[in-house]
């Protein structure tokens, strides 16, 4: 007789199981909604910023280690100073052709007291008149100050007049003080001459280093090479100023001379000197010559976009 095995269900188990489900039935559709009008599956474009000159950018920069002094640890018994101190490319702090003074100071009150020999009270001098005229080498009035009563103790002048003209390097300017008493008596005093071999001033977006061509190319301003030692020292001081504050800024040398050919030759000399001192590339240094009158002849180093 064949044996049969059964598994008995507990009471109520059949009710819990419920009716059998057929797995062949298709489930209901599920609808997925989005707030956007359209579901996009396309990836956004990959935007990666690149520099086409990244691999050669370092070659554009000058080697600043060339400006460093030689360490004192390498001084031998045969010399007691680093040889690189004599190198023309080294910044020499003792060169004082350019300083940080930004104004020209005049002292009219001191001149007033020297003229009248005693101190005047402000009440006594209320009807006094005073003028300070700064004249050029031809005696023309370049700039003027005036007032009533006691003159101020100090007047600071930038070197620029009301017509936006700057004093020229290598030219002398005389301060002329005129004091007029209440009775109309006038007393005139000439102050110390103002003269600079080089000046630095802002003109538009450029900084101008203007130098005396008489010091660079002789008293006639006609030499084709830079004079020694004064001219070379002035160019070295200008190069030191650029190294300390304006390194790697594009430069342009403008030379004003008697003829166009002469100015081009002089500008080329200045350009070559700066190029050797600054060790800058051709793209950072240019030059141009202009013909001008003797009084206007000068040498300008223009720092572009400064």
Image (tube, rainbow, N blue to C red):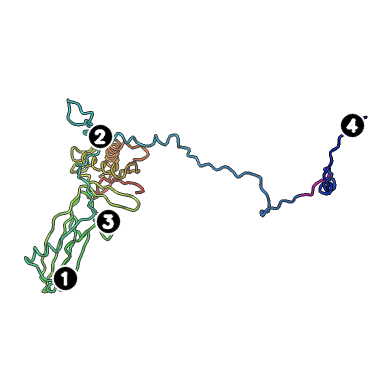
Q: CA distance from mark 4 to mark 1?
A: 141 Å
Tell me which label, 3 or 4, sits earlier in the chain: 4
* Magenta stretch encompasses residue 26: yes
- Sort mark 1 into few (<14), some (14-19) or many (20+) by Cα contacts within 10 Å: some
Q: CA distance from mark 4 to mark 2?
A: 110 Å
Where does the image place residue 245, in percent across and percent down from the top left? 29, 45
Question: Which of the pair 294/273 is nearer the observer?
Answer: 273
| Region rendered in magenta | 24-29
Q: CA distance from mark 1 to mark 3?
A: 29 Å
Q: CA distance from mark 3 to mark 4?
A: 128 Å
Q: Are marks 3 and 4 in contact (CB under 8 Å)?
A: no
- Sort mark 2 into few (<14), some (14-19) or many (20+) by Cα contacts within 10 Å: some
Give the number of the mark in front: 1 or 2: 2
User: Which residue corresponds to mark 1?
Assistant: 149
Give the number of the mark in front: 3 or 4: 4
Give the number of the mark in front: 4 or 1: 4
Tell me which label, 4 or 1, sits earlier in the chain: 4
Where does the image place residue 132, in percent across and percent down from the top left? 17, 63
Position of residue 300 relative to residue 140, above or below, is above
* Magenta stretch encompasses residue 197: no
Tell me which label, 3 or 2, sits earlier in the chain: 2
Task: Identify the disc placed on residue 165.
Answer: 3
Label 2 secondary element: loop
User: Which residue corresponds to mark 2?
Assistant: 69
Task: Identify the disc placed on residue 3.
Answer: 4
């Amino acid at each position: 007789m064949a044996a049969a095995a059964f598994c008995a269900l507990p009471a109520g188990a059949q009710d819990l199981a419920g009716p059998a489900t057929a797995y062949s039935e298709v489930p209901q559709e599920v609808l997925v909604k989005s707030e956007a009008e359209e579901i996009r599956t396309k990836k956004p474009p990959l935007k990666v910023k690149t520099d086409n000159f990244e691999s050669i950018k370092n070659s554009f920069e000058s080697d600043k280690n060339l400006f460093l002094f030689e360490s004192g640890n390498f001084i031998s018994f045969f010399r007691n100073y680093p040889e690189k101190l004599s190198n023309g490319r080294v910044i020499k702090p003792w060169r004082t052709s350019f300083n940080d003074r930004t104004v020209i100071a005049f002292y009219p009150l001191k001149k007033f007291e020297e003229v009248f020999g005693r101190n005047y009270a402000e009440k006594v001098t209320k009807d006094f008149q005073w003028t300070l005229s700064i004249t050029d080498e031809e005696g023309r009035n370049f700039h003027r100050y005036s007032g009533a009563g006691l003159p101020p103790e100090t007047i600071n002048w930038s070197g620029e007049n009301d017509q936006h003209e700057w004093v020229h390097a290598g030219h002398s300017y005389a301060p002329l003080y005129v004091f007029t008493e209440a009775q109309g008596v006038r007393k005139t005093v000439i102050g110390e001459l103002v003269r600079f071999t080089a000046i630095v001033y802002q003109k538009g977006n450029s900084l101008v280093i203007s130098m005396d061509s008489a010091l660079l190319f002789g008293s006639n301003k006609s030499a084709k090479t830079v004079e020694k030692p004064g001219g070379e020292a002035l160019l070295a001081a200008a190069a030191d100023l650029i190294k300390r504050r304006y390194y790697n800024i594009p430069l342009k040398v403008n030379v004003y001379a008697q003829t166009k050919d002469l100015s081009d030759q002089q500008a080329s000399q200045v350009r070559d000197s700066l190029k050797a001192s600054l060790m800058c590339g051709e793209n950072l240094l240019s030059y141009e010559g202009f013909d001008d009158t003797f009084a206007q002849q000068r040498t300008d180093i223009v720092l572009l976009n400064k």
